[in-house]
C-alpha cells in the first residue's frame, strides 16, 4: 500500500473480529514501528504486548475505576460517568491485542519518539489489513504502580502510547478534518 493511501485509509477502529493477529503479525508491526525517527536515533522505546482478552478486560475495569475517581475531582470528566460505570463498556473495545509503547528514558524527547513509533505502527497495521486505535483512556492507569506491575513494565519506564490492534469487524467511516490553519510568515515583518 502506498503511504498516502495508508494515511488516508487508517481509522480508529473500535469493533474487532474474533480472529487474533498472529505473533508474527504483531512482531512485524513492532518491527515497522521502530523505523520511526527518534531524536539522536536513541530509539528510547519498549513494547509491551498483552494478547489475552480476559487480561485486557481486567485492565479496563481497573482503568475505569481510576478514571471514575478522577471524575469526582475533575468536573470536565463528569460527562463520562455513565460510560465508566457501565460494565459493558470495555475501554479496549474487546480488541484481542494491546501494544503499550513505553519510553525508556525520562526526557520529553522520548515521549515524541514514542508517539512517532505509535503512528508508524498504526499505519503499518492498516497497510496489513489490521485495525488499531490509541487508547488514551488507559494511560493514567497504566502509569500507576498497579498498572505497571500488571503488565510487567519497569517502574522507570513511562507508558506513552497504548495501541489496541486486531482485525476490523466491518468498516469505519472517516472522521472529517478541519482545513489546516496555514500562515505564511512574511520575511522582515514586525
Ligand atoms: C492521543 C490519543 C488518544 C486517544 N484516546 C482514545 C481513547 O481513549 N478511546 C478511543 O476510543 N479513541 C481514542 N483515540 C482515537 C481518536 O478518537 C481518533 O483518532 C480521532 O477521533 C480521529 O479519528 P480517526 O483516527 O479514525 O481519524 C485517541 C487518539 C489519540 C491520538
Image (cartoon, helix red, strand yellow):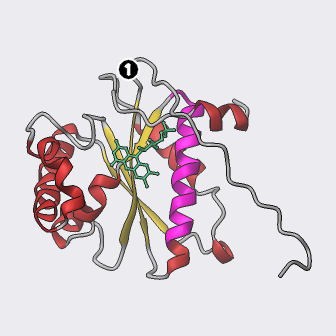
**Which of the two residues, 88 or 101, is positioned nearer the viewer here?**
88
**Which of the two residues, 130 or 93, is positioned nearer the viewer here?**
93
Q: Which residue is drawn at 37% across and 20% down?
A: 169
Q: In which quarter of the image is the C terminus?
A: bottom right
Query: Taking 2 as reference, is 6 left or right?
Result: left
Magenta segment, principal secondary structure? helix
The image quadrant in which ligand 1 is located: top left
Query: Taking 123 as reference, is 80 left or right?
Result: left
In this view, 91 is above or below 154: above
Label 1, secondary structure: give it.
loop
Mark 1: few, some, or many residues within 10 Å (few <14, many ≥20)? Answer: some
Quarter occupied by residue 117: bottom right
Q: In which quarter of the image is the N terminus?
A: top right
Question: Does residue 45 show up magenta in the picture?
Answer: no
Q: Residue at x 27, y 55 (%)?
A: 138
The span shown in magenta is: 111-129
Q: Give x and y (percent) for residue 153.
A: 29, 67
Q: Give x and y (percent) for residue 25.
A: 48, 36
* Residue lying farthest to the right in this orientation: 187
Q: Give x and y (percent) for residue 100.
A: 37, 56
**In this figure, what is the number of numbered marks?**
1
Q: Which residue is drawn at 46% across and 79% down?
A: 105
In this view, 190 is above or below 129: below
In this view, 127 is above or below 79: above
Q: Mark 1 points at which residue?
A: 169
Q: Give x and y (percent) for residue 91.
A: 24, 44
Query: Taking 134 as reference, is 69 left or right?
Result: left
Q: Residue at x 74, y 55 (%)?
A: 182
In this view, 133 is above or below 99: above
Question: Does residue 125 show up magenta in the picture?
Answer: yes
* Residue lying farthest to the front in this orientation: 190
Amino acid at each position: 500500500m502506498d503511504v498516502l493511501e495508508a494515511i488516508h485509509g487508517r481509522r480508529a477502529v473500535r469493533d474487532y473480529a474474533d480472529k487474533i493477529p498472529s505473533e508474527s503479525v504483531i512482531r512485524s508491526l513492532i518491527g515497522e514501528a521502530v523505523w520511526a525517527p527518534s531524536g539522536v536515533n536513541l530509539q528510547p522505546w519498549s513494547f509491551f504486548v498483552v494478547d489475552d482478552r480476559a487480561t485486557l478486560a481486567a485492565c479496563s475495569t481497573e482503568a475505569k475505576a481510576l478514571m471514575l475517581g478522577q471524575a469526582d475531582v475533575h468536573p470536565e470528566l463528569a460527562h463520562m460517568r455513565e460510560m465508566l460505570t457501565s460494565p459493558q463498556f470495555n475501554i479496549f473495545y474487546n480488541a484481542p491485542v494491546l501494544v503499550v509503547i513505553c519510553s525508556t528514558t525520562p526526557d520529553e524527547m522520548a515521549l515524541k519518539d514514542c508517539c512517532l513509533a505509535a503512528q508508524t505502527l498504526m499505519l503499518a497495521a492498516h497497510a496489513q489489513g489490521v485495525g488499531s486505535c490509541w487508547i488514551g483512556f488507559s494511560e493514567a492507569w497504566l502509569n500507576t504502580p498497579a498498572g505497571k506491575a500488571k503488565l510487567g513494565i519497569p517502574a522507570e519506564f513511562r507508558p506513552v502510547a497504548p495501541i489496541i490492534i486486531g482485525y476490523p469487524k466491518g468498516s469505519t467511516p472517516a472522521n472529517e478534518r478541519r482545513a489546516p490553519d496555514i500562515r505564511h510568515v512574511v520575511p522582515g515583518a514586525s
